Image: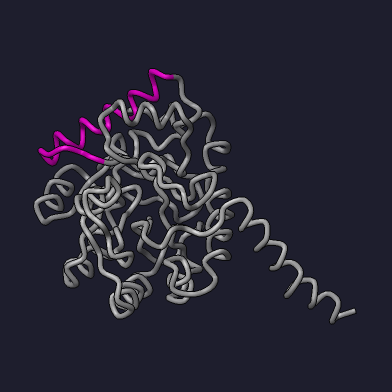
Amino acid sequence: MFWLYAFLFLVILPLISYIVWKLVWGPVSPSFPKVLAYHKVTGFEFGGTWMTKKRFISSLDYLLDSGFCFITEDLFLDTVSGKRIGSGREILMTFDDGYRMIIESALPALEERKIPALIFMVTAYAGRENRWELRLPGRRFGHMGWDEVRDLSARGFSFGSHSRTHCDLTRLEIGDLRSELYKSKEEIEKAINSPVRTVSYPFGRSNLSVRTEARAAGYEAAFTLYPSGKNNRLDPFDLRREGVWIIDTCGSLGNKLGQGKLFWAEDLKGRAINRVAGLTPFFKGKSSLDLRL
Ligand SMILES: [Zn+2]
């Protein structure tokens, strides 16, 4: 009986998962620019979107030693628009939510290695606690304030919008949707005194209406985590990113970036984790409207 269960779990289940993955999503084109999505670089917290400083730094060195290089938001956008051809080994580093802790825990390691990064701000929470997140013990973290954003922008870090209140944009009326997209862009532009070119959808959630409004608001590109449909489709307003979670190792990071043979398993894992994280707005209500400032 043991061998039957072992056969089912180790052979049949992975085989069926692989076939389903191949039919529904399939491989990513190797030439697509790669994007990593980090959130918190900190000690333990209840949730999966954190990473220890030690592991974060070792992952940077692993990627550099593996021959990857990191590019700026500008170069990345030129690659997406076809103005330049990427090498296929270029990575854009992104951080969602704009947590203050990354100023100490992540950004110095990037500066030491001359790695650029794009940070997505939840503008109504700039300088405030993350009250939009589920209230679990130890989950209160501060977001960067505008003075810190200005300082980091002067040091070469790029900034994009992650909405005003981190709500699920697909559940908003058109007026609220526009407010989230337009005002957040204006607020960051006022702080950094230069155009905000990109937006990252909270929880990675968008639909046709959200993508249309993001384009109308003047963004040049928009990021999700795992787009629906085939992975070899490159939509500038539904750009794929590889989420990096506490359970990830250098090996899994390599697979996410096409280094190993298990990209399909990492894709399925990332989609499953993102699906769970996407339940937050259902627990919090329609949006963070009660917290809207
Ligand atoms: Zn977020």
Quadrant in the picture for the C terminus: top left
The number of numbered badges drawn on the structure is 0
Residue 179 in the image, given as x and y percentages of width and height: 33, 24
Using residue 90 as the reference point, say whether residue 29 is left or right of it: right
Residue drawn 37% across the image and 34% down it:
165
Residue 208 in the image, given as x and y percentages of width and height: 46, 30
Magenta-highlighted residues: 174-197
Q: Quadrant of residue 30?
A: bottom left
Residue 120 in the image, given as x and y percentages of width and height: 30, 46
Using residue 98 as the reference point, say whether residue 139 is left or right of it: right
Kindly tell me whether residue 220 is visible in this rendering.
yes
Depth check: give the residue in front, 28 or 46: 28
Residue drawn 58% across the image and 49% down it:
276
Depth check: give the residue in front, 103 or 181: 181
Residue drawn 80% across the image and 71% down it:
8
Using residue 129 as the reference point, say whether residue 279 is left or right of it: right
Depth check: give the residue in front, 27 or 272: 27
Specify whether residue 183 is painted magenta: yes
Quadrant in the picture for the N terminus: bottom right
Specify whether residue 228 is painted magenta: no
Q: Main secondary structure of the magenta part?
A: helix
Kindly tell me whether residue 38 is visible in this rendering.
no
Depth check: give the residue in front, 251 or 260: 260
